[in-house]
Amino acid sequence: MATAIATPHVESVRISRWTYLLGYLGAVIAAEILIAIPGGATGTDRPFQSIGLGIHILLVFTLMFLSVIMQPKDAMLAPLLVAASLASLVRVFSLAVPRYNFVTAPVTDPLNTLPWLALVSDILLVFTLMFLSVIMQPKDAMLAPLLVAASLASLVRVFSLAVPRYNFVTAPVTDPLNTLPWLALVSVPLLVSVAAVAYVQRLRPRDLGLTFARWPEIVQQMAIALTGIPLGLVEFVILRPPAWIAGLTFGSLVLGGLVIFFATGFSEELIFRAILLKRAVEGLGTRGGLLYVTAIFASLHIFFLNGVDLVFVFAVGLFYGLIVLKTRNLWGVILSHSLGNVILYLVAPFLTH
Protein backbone atom coordinates (compact mmCIF):
# COMPACT_ATOMS: atom_id res chain seq x y z
CA MET A 1 0.00 0.00 0.00
CA ALA A 2 2.83 2.40 0.90
CA THR A 3 4.54 1.79 -2.43
CA ALA A 4 1.36 2.45 -4.41
CA ILE A 5 0.91 5.82 -2.68
CA ALA A 6 4.56 6.87 -2.91
CA THR A 7 5.08 6.11 -6.60
CA PRO A 8 2.79 8.84 -8.06
CA HIS A 9 4.31 11.36 -5.66
CA VAL A 10 7.84 10.46 -6.71
CA GLU A 11 6.84 10.73 -10.37
CA SER A 12 5.25 14.16 -9.87
CA VAL A 13 8.37 15.38 -8.06
CA ARG A 14 10.55 14.19 -10.94
CA ILE A 15 8.29 15.95 -13.48
CA SER A 16 8.55 19.12 -11.40
CA ARG A 17 12.34 18.87 -11.47
CA TRP A 18 12.35 18.46 -15.24
CA THR A 19 10.16 21.56 -15.59
CA TYR A 20 12.72 23.73 -13.80
CA LEU A 21 15.74 22.16 -15.48
CA LEU A 22 14.38 22.16 -19.03
CA GLY A 23 13.42 25.80 -18.54
CA TYR A 24 17.01 26.52 -17.54
CA LEU A 25 18.40 24.57 -20.52
CA GLY A 26 16.16 26.53 -22.89
CA ALA A 27 17.35 29.82 -21.40
CA VAL A 28 21.02 28.74 -21.69
CA ILE A 29 20.56 27.82 -25.37
CA ALA A 30 18.81 31.16 -26.05
CA ALA A 31 21.63 33.07 -24.31
CA GLU A 32 24.32 31.16 -26.21
CA ILE A 33 22.60 31.81 -29.54
CA LEU A 34 22.47 35.54 -28.74
CA ILE A 35 26.16 35.50 -27.80
CA ALA A 36 27.10 33.67 -31.00
CA ILE A 37 25.08 35.71 -33.53
CA PRO A 38 27.57 37.49 -35.81
CA GLY A 39 27.11 41.01 -37.11
CA GLY A 40 28.82 44.03 -38.54
CA ALA A 41 30.34 44.55 -41.97
CA THR A 42 32.91 41.80 -41.52
CA GLY A 43 30.66 39.39 -39.62
CA THR A 44 33.11 39.17 -36.72
CA ASP A 45 31.17 41.36 -34.29
CA ARG A 46 28.85 39.91 -31.64
CA PRO A 47 26.15 42.60 -31.35
CA PHE A 48 23.94 40.67 -28.90
CA GLN A 49 26.70 39.41 -26.60
CA SER A 50 25.76 41.80 -23.80
CA ILE A 51 22.20 40.45 -23.78
CA GLY A 52 23.46 36.85 -23.55
CA LEU A 53 25.78 37.81 -20.70
CA GLY A 54 22.92 39.50 -18.88
CA ILE A 55 20.75 36.38 -19.26
CA HIS A 56 23.48 34.16 -17.80
CA ILE A 57 23.98 36.48 -14.81
CA LEU A 58 20.23 36.46 -14.16
CA LEU A 59 20.16 32.67 -14.54
CA VAL A 60 22.81 32.21 -11.85
CA PHE A 61 20.93 34.54 -9.54
CA THR A 62 17.57 32.88 -10.32
CA LEU A 63 18.83 29.33 -9.75
CA MET A 64 20.45 30.29 -6.47
CA PHE A 65 17.25 32.00 -5.36
CA LEU A 66 15.15 28.99 -6.38
CA SER A 67 17.49 26.67 -4.46
CA VAL A 68 16.68 28.59 -1.28
CA ILE A 69 12.94 28.36 -1.96
CA MET A 70 13.03 24.67 -2.93
CA GLN A 71 15.24 23.52 -0.04
CA PRO A 72 12.34 22.66 2.33
CA LYS A 73 10.17 21.30 -0.51
CA ASP A 74 12.61 19.17 -2.49
CA ALA A 75 15.96 18.60 -0.77
CA MET A 76 17.35 16.92 -3.88
CA LEU A 77 16.37 19.64 -6.36
CA ALA A 78 17.92 22.47 -4.31
CA PRO A 79 21.57 21.35 -4.63
CA LEU A 80 20.93 20.34 -8.26
CA LEU A 81 19.89 23.92 -9.05
CA VAL A 82 23.06 25.23 -7.40
CA ALA A 83 25.15 22.76 -9.41
CA ALA A 84 23.37 23.69 -12.66
CA SER A 85 24.15 27.38 -12.09
CA LEU A 86 27.85 26.57 -12.53
CA ALA A 87 27.27 26.18 -16.28
CA SER A 88 26.19 29.82 -16.52
CA LEU A 89 28.98 30.75 -14.12
CA VAL A 90 31.50 29.50 -16.69
CA ARG A 91 30.05 31.81 -19.33
CA VAL A 92 29.81 34.78 -16.93
CA PHE A 93 33.50 34.60 -16.09
CA SER A 94 34.53 34.03 -19.70
CA LEU A 95 32.62 37.12 -20.85
CA ALA A 96 32.84 39.43 -17.85
CA VAL A 97 36.59 39.23 -17.34
CA PRO A 98 38.25 41.28 -20.10
CA ARG A 99 40.90 39.92 -22.44
CA TYR A 100 43.82 42.09 -21.41
CA ASN A 101 46.63 42.67 -23.87
CA PHE A 102 49.19 40.54 -22.04
CA VAL A 103 51.50 40.20 -25.03
CA THR A 104 51.36 43.65 -26.63
CA ALA A 105 50.99 47.06 -25.05
CA PRO A 106 47.46 47.59 -23.67
CA VAL A 107 45.18 49.72 -25.80
CA THR A 108 43.27 50.94 -22.75
CA ASP A 109 44.48 52.94 -19.78
CA PRO A 110 46.26 50.66 -17.24
CA LEU A 111 44.29 52.41 -14.51
CA ASN A 112 41.19 50.64 -15.85
CA THR A 113 42.55 47.35 -14.48
CA LEU A 114 41.38 48.13 -10.93
CA PRO A 115 37.68 48.41 -11.86
CA TRP A 116 37.92 45.03 -13.57
CA LEU A 117 39.44 43.47 -10.47
CA ALA A 118 36.53 44.99 -8.55
CA LEU A 119 34.16 43.37 -11.06
CA VAL A 120 35.61 39.93 -10.34
CA SER A 121 35.24 40.64 -6.59
CA ASP A 122 31.58 41.62 -7.05
CA ILE A 123 30.88 38.46 -9.05
CA LEU A 124 32.39 36.39 -6.25
CA LEU A 125 30.36 38.32 -3.67
CA VAL A 126 27.10 37.53 -5.47
CA PHE A 127 27.81 33.82 -5.55
CA THR A 128 29.24 33.74 -2.02
CA LEU A 129 26.13 35.37 -0.55
CA MET A 130 23.90 32.97 -2.47
CA PHE A 131 25.90 29.97 -1.25
CA LEU A 132 25.71 31.28 2.32
CA SER A 133 21.95 31.68 1.99
CA VAL A 134 21.67 27.97 1.17
CA ILE A 135 23.79 27.08 4.21
CA MET A 136 21.89 29.38 6.56
CA GLN A 137 18.39 28.44 5.41
CA PRO A 138 17.90 25.61 7.96
CA LYS A 139 19.73 27.55 10.70
CA ASP A 140 18.34 31.07 10.37
CA ALA A 141 15.25 31.49 8.19
CA MET A 142 15.48 35.30 8.40
CA LEU A 143 19.16 35.63 7.53
CA ALA A 144 18.97 33.47 4.39
CA PRO A 145 16.65 35.79 2.40
CA LEU A 146 18.54 38.81 3.74
CA LEU A 147 21.77 37.46 2.23
CA VAL A 148 19.98 37.00 -1.10
CA ALA A 149 18.74 40.59 -0.95
CA ALA A 150 22.21 41.89 -0.05
CA SER A 151 23.69 40.22 -3.09
CA LEU A 152 21.60 42.53 -5.29
CA ALA A 153 24.02 45.38 -4.60
CA SER A 154 26.92 43.46 -6.09
CA LEU A 155 24.70 42.22 -8.92
CA VAL A 156 23.95 45.81 -9.91
CA ARG A 157 27.69 46.54 -10.03
CA VAL A 158 28.34 43.42 -12.13
CA PHE A 159 25.86 44.67 -14.74
CA SER A 160 27.20 48.24 -14.70
CA LEU A 161 30.83 47.14 -15.15
CA ALA A 162 30.53 44.06 -17.32
CA VAL A 163 28.10 45.02 -20.05
CA PRO A 164 29.24 48.45 -21.37
CA ARG A 165 32.90 47.49 -21.61
CA TYR A 166 32.67 45.41 -24.80
CA ASN A 167 33.10 46.63 -28.37
CA PHE A 168 29.84 45.32 -29.80
CA VAL A 169 29.62 47.80 -32.66
CA THR A 170 33.23 47.81 -33.89
CA ALA A 171 35.28 44.70 -34.48
CA PRO A 172 37.30 43.76 -31.38
CA VAL A 173 41.07 43.66 -31.76
CA THR A 174 42.00 40.25 -30.38
CA ASP A 175 45.29 38.38 -30.27
CA PRO A 176 45.14 34.58 -29.82
CA LEU A 177 48.38 34.81 -27.84
CA ASN A 178 46.47 36.68 -25.13
CA THR A 179 44.13 33.73 -24.56
CA LEU A 180 46.32 31.69 -22.19
CA PRO A 181 47.06 34.56 -19.76
CA TRP A 182 43.38 35.48 -19.90
CA LEU A 183 42.36 31.88 -19.14
CA ALA A 184 44.76 31.84 -16.19
CA LEU A 185 43.10 34.98 -14.83
CA VAL A 186 39.58 33.62 -15.28
CA SER A 187 40.36 30.20 -13.79
CA VAL A 188 41.15 31.55 -10.32
CA PRO A 189 37.70 32.93 -9.37
CA LEU A 190 36.05 30.08 -11.27
CA LEU A 191 37.88 27.40 -9.28
CA VAL A 192 37.20 29.27 -6.03
CA SER A 193 33.48 29.28 -6.85
CA VAL A 194 33.50 25.58 -7.76
CA ALA A 195 35.26 24.79 -4.48
CA ALA A 196 32.65 26.84 -2.63
CA VAL A 197 29.81 24.86 -4.22
CA ALA A 198 31.50 21.56 -3.35
CA TYR A 199 32.00 22.73 0.24
CA VAL A 200 28.42 23.99 0.58
CA GLN A 201 27.07 20.69 -0.69
CA ARG A 202 29.45 18.71 1.54
CA LEU A 203 31.05 16.93 -1.42
CA ARG A 204 34.36 15.31 -0.48
CA PRO A 205 37.15 14.49 -2.97
CA ARG A 206 35.91 10.89 -2.98
CA ASP A 207 32.38 12.05 -3.88
CA LEU A 208 33.83 14.04 -6.79
CA GLY A 209 35.85 11.11 -8.12
CA LEU A 210 39.23 12.60 -7.23
CA THR A 211 40.62 9.67 -5.23
CA PHE A 212 41.94 6.23 -6.14
CA ALA A 213 40.90 3.08 -4.27
CA ARG A 214 43.31 0.70 -6.04
CA TRP A 215 46.48 0.98 -8.12
CA PRO A 216 44.93 -0.58 -11.27
CA GLU A 217 42.57 2.39 -11.42
CA ILE A 218 45.55 4.65 -12.19
CA VAL A 219 46.41 2.60 -15.28
CA GLN A 220 42.77 2.64 -16.33
CA GLN A 221 42.50 6.41 -15.96
CA MET A 222 45.75 6.98 -17.86
CA ALA A 223 44.36 4.93 -20.76
CA ILE A 224 41.22 7.08 -20.73
CA ALA A 225 43.40 10.21 -20.67
CA LEU A 226 45.07 9.19 -23.94
CA THR A 227 41.72 9.48 -25.75
CA GLY A 228 42.32 13.23 -25.63
CA ILE A 229 44.86 12.94 -28.45
CA PRO A 230 42.49 11.68 -31.18
CA LEU A 231 39.64 13.81 -29.81
CA GLY A 232 41.80 16.95 -30.02
CA LEU A 233 42.89 16.13 -33.57
CA VAL A 234 39.32 15.54 -34.71
CA GLU A 235 38.12 18.82 -33.26
CA PHE A 236 41.03 20.65 -34.87
CA VAL A 237 39.95 19.30 -38.26
CA ILE A 238 36.47 20.65 -37.52
CA LEU A 239 37.38 24.11 -36.15
CA ARG A 240 40.91 24.93 -37.41
CA PRO A 241 41.56 27.48 -34.61
CA PRO A 242 44.72 29.65 -34.44
CA ALA A 243 47.51 28.68 -32.04
CA TRP A 244 47.50 30.08 -28.51
CA ILE A 245 51.32 30.13 -28.37
CA ALA A 246 53.90 31.88 -30.57
CA GLY A 247 55.98 28.77 -31.15
CA LEU A 248 55.96 25.07 -30.33
CA THR A 249 58.66 24.99 -27.64
CA PHE A 250 58.96 22.80 -24.55
CA GLY A 251 58.50 25.75 -22.18
CA SER A 252 55.44 27.18 -23.91
CA LEU A 253 53.92 23.70 -24.16
CA VAL A 254 54.37 23.03 -20.42
CA LEU A 255 53.12 26.45 -19.28
CA GLY A 256 50.26 26.42 -21.76
CA GLY A 257 49.34 22.88 -20.77
CA LEU A 258 49.17 23.84 -17.08
CA VAL A 259 46.86 26.77 -17.81
CA ILE A 260 44.64 24.61 -20.00
CA PHE A 261 44.58 21.90 -17.32
CA PHE A 262 43.28 24.20 -14.57
CA ALA A 263 41.13 26.50 -16.71
CA THR A 264 39.39 23.87 -18.87
CA GLY A 265 40.04 20.22 -18.00
CA PHE A 266 40.03 20.42 -14.21
CA SER A 267 37.46 23.17 -13.67
CA GLU A 268 34.99 22.15 -16.39
CA GLU A 269 35.04 18.45 -15.49
CA LEU A 270 34.52 19.28 -11.83
CA ILE A 271 31.49 21.32 -12.85
CA PHE A 272 29.89 19.07 -15.44
CA ARG A 273 30.99 15.48 -14.79
CA ALA A 274 31.44 15.71 -10.99
CA ILE A 275 29.08 18.14 -9.24
CA LEU A 276 26.36 18.66 -11.85
CA LEU A 277 26.26 15.06 -13.12
CA LYS A 278 26.09 13.70 -9.56
CA ARG A 279 23.14 15.94 -8.65
CA ALA A 280 21.41 15.40 -12.00
CA VAL A 281 21.58 11.62 -11.71
CA GLU A 282 20.24 11.80 -8.15
CA GLY A 283 17.35 14.02 -9.20
CA LEU A 284 16.56 12.81 -12.74
CA GLY A 285 17.88 9.26 -12.95
CA THR A 286 20.97 8.01 -14.75
CA ARG A 287 19.80 8.39 -18.35
CA GLY A 288 17.96 11.66 -17.86
CA GLY A 289 20.73 13.18 -15.76
CA LEU A 290 23.43 12.23 -18.27
CA LEU A 291 21.52 13.62 -21.25
CA TYR A 292 20.65 16.83 -19.42
CA VAL A 293 24.21 17.58 -18.31
CA THR A 294 25.55 16.76 -21.78
CA ALA A 295 23.00 19.09 -23.38
CA ILE A 296 24.13 21.98 -21.16
CA PHE A 297 27.79 21.19 -21.85
CA ALA A 298 27.20 21.14 -25.61
CA SER A 299 25.09 24.31 -25.59
CA LEU A 300 28.06 26.30 -24.27
CA HIS A 301 29.81 25.50 -27.58
CA ILE A 302 27.18 27.19 -29.75
CA PHE A 303 29.59 30.14 -29.68
CA PHE A 304 31.71 28.48 -32.40
CA LEU A 305 28.77 28.57 -34.86
CA ASN A 306 29.68 25.12 -36.14
CA GLY A 307 26.98 22.45 -36.24
CA VAL A 308 29.45 19.62 -36.76
CA ASP A 309 31.42 20.70 -33.68
CA LEU A 310 28.19 20.91 -31.66
CA VAL A 311 27.38 17.27 -32.50
CA PHE A 312 30.99 16.27 -31.80
CA VAL A 313 31.03 18.01 -28.40
CA PHE A 314 27.70 16.39 -27.47
CA ALA A 315 29.14 12.97 -28.30
CA VAL A 316 32.29 13.69 -26.30
CA GLY A 317 30.15 14.86 -23.38
CA LEU A 318 28.21 11.58 -23.45
CA PHE A 319 31.46 9.64 -23.67
CA TYR A 320 32.97 11.44 -20.67
CA GLY A 321 29.76 11.12 -18.66
CA LEU A 322 29.47 7.39 -19.28
CA ILE A 323 33.10 6.89 -18.26
CA VAL A 324 32.63 8.78 -14.98
CA LEU A 325 29.42 6.89 -14.19
CA LYS A 326 31.13 3.58 -14.94
CA THR A 327 34.49 4.13 -13.24
CA ARG A 328 33.42 6.56 -10.47
CA ASN A 329 36.65 8.44 -11.15
CA LEU A 330 37.15 11.86 -12.73
CA TRP A 331 40.88 11.92 -13.47
CA GLY A 332 40.70 10.15 -16.83
CA VAL A 333 38.25 12.65 -18.35
CA ILE A 334 40.06 15.61 -16.71
CA LEU A 335 43.31 14.61 -18.41
CA SER A 336 41.59 13.65 -21.67
CA HIS A 337 39.81 17.02 -21.80
CA SER A 338 43.06 18.86 -21.01
CA LEU A 339 45.13 16.85 -23.49
CA GLY A 340 42.51 17.35 -26.17
CA ASN A 341 42.68 21.13 -25.78
CA VAL A 342 46.48 21.04 -25.74
CA ILE A 343 46.41 19.23 -29.08
CA LEU A 344 43.68 21.54 -30.40
CA TYR A 345 45.25 24.89 -29.49
CA LEU A 346 48.97 24.29 -28.86
CA VAL A 347 50.12 21.42 -31.09
CA ALA A 348 47.89 20.80 -34.11
CA PRO A 349 48.05 24.38 -35.49
CA PHE A 350 51.81 23.93 -36.00
CA LEU A 351 51.49 20.46 -37.55
CA THR A 352 49.52 21.87 -40.49
CA HIS A 353 52.13 24.49 -41.43
Image (tube, rainbow, N blue to C red):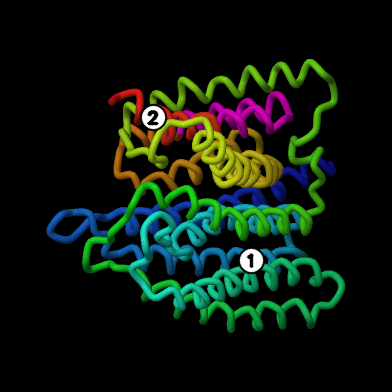
Residue span colored magenta: 314-336
Q: Is residue 25 above or below residue 349?
A: below
Residue that numbered label 1 is attached to: 64
**Which class describes the residues within 10 Å of circle 2: few (<14), some (14-19), or many (20+)?**
some
- Which residue is pictured at 27% across the width and 55% down the height? 37
In the rendered view of the protein, which quadrant contains the N terminus?
top right
**Which class describes the residues within 10 Å of circle 1: few (<14), some (14-19), or many (20+)?**
many
Q: Is residue 77 above or below residue 160?
A: above
Does residue 223 appear to the left or right of 207 in the view shown? left
Estimate the spatial distance between the alpha carbons at disc 1 and disc 2, rounded to whole Å: 34 Å
Does residue 256 appear to the left or right of 130 in the view shown? left
Mark 1 or mark 2: whose residue is earlier in sequence: 1
Which mark is nearer the camera, 1 or 2? Answer: 2
The spot of residue 265 in percent (x, y) is 58, 39
Residue that numbered label 2 is attached to: 235
> Is any part of residue 19 visible from this angle?
no
State which quadrant residue 74 falls in. bottom right
10 drawn magenta: no
Q: Secondary structure at mark 1?
A: helix
- Which residue is pictured at 67% across the width and 41% down the height? 274
Q: How many marks?
A: 2
Q: Main secondary structure of the magenta part?
A: helix
Q: Residue furthest left?
A: 41
Q: Secondary structure at mark 2?
A: helix
Q: Is residue 222 above or below residue 57?
A: above
- Name the residue type under label 1: Met
* Nearest to the observer: residue 317 or residue 251: 251
